[in-house]
Image (spheres, rainbow, N blue to C red):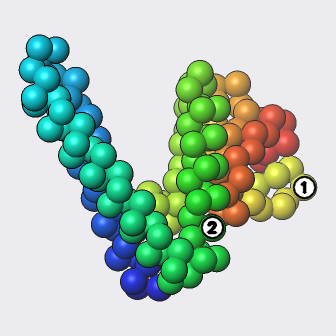
């Protein structure tokens, strides 16, 4: 990944964090304060546009990298949806530890972005290729 794309992704992350703060602020605004609500909504819409514009810059710079990012984002959302009702006893991420994988009983290793183990021994993983997969605990060492 080029330095320019990394820089753009950092900007996107900053804007997304700021947008989340604005959403939290919006929840705390009294319902009768329509002017302040409209201001916050306008700010959030502007931030969404900024993110979209930055994404288009990535697409122009490297369409393959853009497609990979979109694939991983979709898989991350799938992972979040699957995980809503699960209780994990162990979670590992590539960002956190620098190493993230599961090893199957046959010795095959699957490198991942995220691995999460449930109380019952089952695993949910987000692969480097942007796939969300679930495995029964009996298949993992």
Residue 95 in the image, given as x and y percentages of width and height: 46, 61
Residue that extends furthest to the right in the rendered view of this protein: 106
Residue 25 in the image, given as x and y percentages of width and height: 17, 32
Secondary structure type for disc 1:
loop
**In the foreground, 47 or 92:** 47
Residue 139 falls left or right of residue 97: right
Q: Could you tell me if residue 76 is visible in this image?
A: yes
Secondary structure type for disc 2:
helix
Measuring 60% from the left and 25% from the top, which residue is drawn there?
Answer: 86
Characterize the local packing of mark 1: few (<14), some (14-19) or many (20 or more) Cα atoms within 10 angstroms: few
Q: Earlier in the sequence, mark 2 or mark 1?
A: 2
Q: In the image, which disc is placed on residue 118?
A: none
Residue 48 falls left or right of residue 2: left
Judging by the rendered image, the residue that carries numbered circle 2 is 68
Measuring 28% from the left and 58% from the top, which residue is drawn there?
Answer: 14
Judging by the rendered image, the residue that carries numbered circle 1 is 106
Q: Quadrant of residue 122?
A: top right
Between the C-alphas of marks 2 and 1, the distance is 29 Å
Measuring 17% from the left and 29% from the top, which residue is drawn there?
Answer: 37
Q: Are marks 2 and 1 in contact (CB under 8 Å)?
A: no
Measuring 54% from the left and 49% from the top, which residue is drawn there?
Answer: 92
The tally of labels here is 2
**In the foreground, 65 or 109:** 65
Residue 24 falls left or right of residue 73: left
4 shown above or below 9:
below
Residue 61 in the image, given as x and y percentages of width and height: 50, 83
Depth-wise, is mark 2 or mark 1 nearer the camera? 2
Residue 123 in the image, given as x and y percentages of width and height: 70, 39
122 shown above or below 2:
above
């Amino acid at each position: 990944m080029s330095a320019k794309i990394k820089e753009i992704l950092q900007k996107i992350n900053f804007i997304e964090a700021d947008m989340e703060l604005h959403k939290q602020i919006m929840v705390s605004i009294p319902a009768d304060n329509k002017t302040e609500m409209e201001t916050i909504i306008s700010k959030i819409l502007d931030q969404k546009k900024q993110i979209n514009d930055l994404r288009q810059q990535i697409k122009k710079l490297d369409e393959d990298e853009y497609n990979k990012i979109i694939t991983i984002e979709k898989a991350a959302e799938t992972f979040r949806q699957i995980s809503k009702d699960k209780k994990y006893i162990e979670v590992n991420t590539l960002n956190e530890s620098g190493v993230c994988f599961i090893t199957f009983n046959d010795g095959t290793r699957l490198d991942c972005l995220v691995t999460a183990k449930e109380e019952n021994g089952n695993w949910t993983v987000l692969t480097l290729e942007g796939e969300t997969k679930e495995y029964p605990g009996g298949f993992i060492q």
